[in-house]
Amino acid sequence: MWGSRQASPLTASLGTIAAMRLLAVFAHPDDELGCIGTLAKHARRGDAVLLAWTTHGELASQFTEDEASVRRIRQEHGATIAKLIGAEHHFFDMGDSMLTGSRREALQLARLYARFQPDAIITWSDDHPHPDHRMTARIAFDAVTLARIPKIINHDLSEPLAPHR
């Protein structure tokens, strides 16, 4: 789907699987817990794994610290989890509880897709009860299409896109 990487005739005949690139997109640090075993297994077998969060989870209700401290704690959580399983990580700053599913948000993620070129993406379902999870799913789905259009990916986000025709 994402590129021309295919098993060579030798690896195909031996039944080995070529390394894949797996991107997991979540709304908040700690959302990865539901699939951490799968992510760790892929990283352990040599697949490139990238964890991405659309927010820092700075409004999490279980913390009593100020927003900046929670942001730091949650970033450290994400970095630690990624390191423990042998993955890379990336945080977007789309604002906890402020996701809209907009084109601008999807473009940010699409640029990450274009750089990383995942073979598979793990994310939320678009019917999840939590609004940030639903919007993250929408952003993730839209980004797949946008990532395939170089003129869009290379557009400066500080300027509005011109209407099509």
Image (tube, helix red, strand yellow):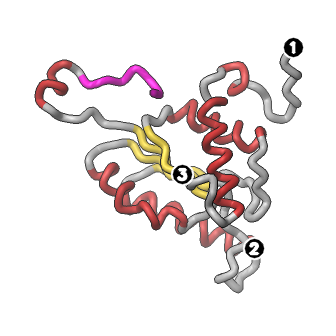
Residue at numbered disc 3: 123
Label 3 crowding class (10 Å Cα cut-off): few <14, some 14-19, many 20+? many
Q: Quadrant of the N terminus?
A: top left
Q: Which residues are magenta?
A: 1-7
Whether residues under marks 3 and 1 lie with C-beta atoms below 8 angstroms apart, the answer is no
Magenta span: predominant SS is loop
Closer to viewer: mark 2 or mark 1: 1
Q: Earlier in the sequence, mark 3 or mark 2?
A: 2
Specify the amino acid type for callout 1.
Arg
Whether residues under marks 2 and 1 lie with C-beta atoms below 8 angstroms apart, the answer is no
Q: Alpha carbon of mark 2 to alpha carbon of mark 1: how far? A: 44 Å
Q: Quadrant of residue 119?
A: top left
**Where residue 129 sits: x, y (%)?**
65, 65
Specify the amino acid type for callout 3.
Thr
Residue 26 colored in magenta in the image: no
Residue 165 - label: 1
Q: Earlier in the sequence, mark 3 or mark 1?
A: 3
Q: Nearer the viewer, residue 32 or 70?
A: 32
Give the SS element for disc 2. Answer: helix
- Tell me what residue is drawn at x 29 percent, y 44 percent: 46
Residue 67 - label: 2
Specify the amino acid type for callout 2.
Glu
Residue 156 lies left or right of residue 106; in this view the side is right
**Where residue 125 sits: x, y (%)?**
57, 54
Q: Is residue 91 visible?
A: no
104 relative to 93, above or below:
above
Q: Nearer the viewer, residue 131 or 38?
A: 131
Give the SS element for disc 1. Answer: loop
Q: Earlier in the sequence, mark 2 or mark 1?
A: 2
- Tell me what residue is drawn at x 42 percent, y 52 percent: 87
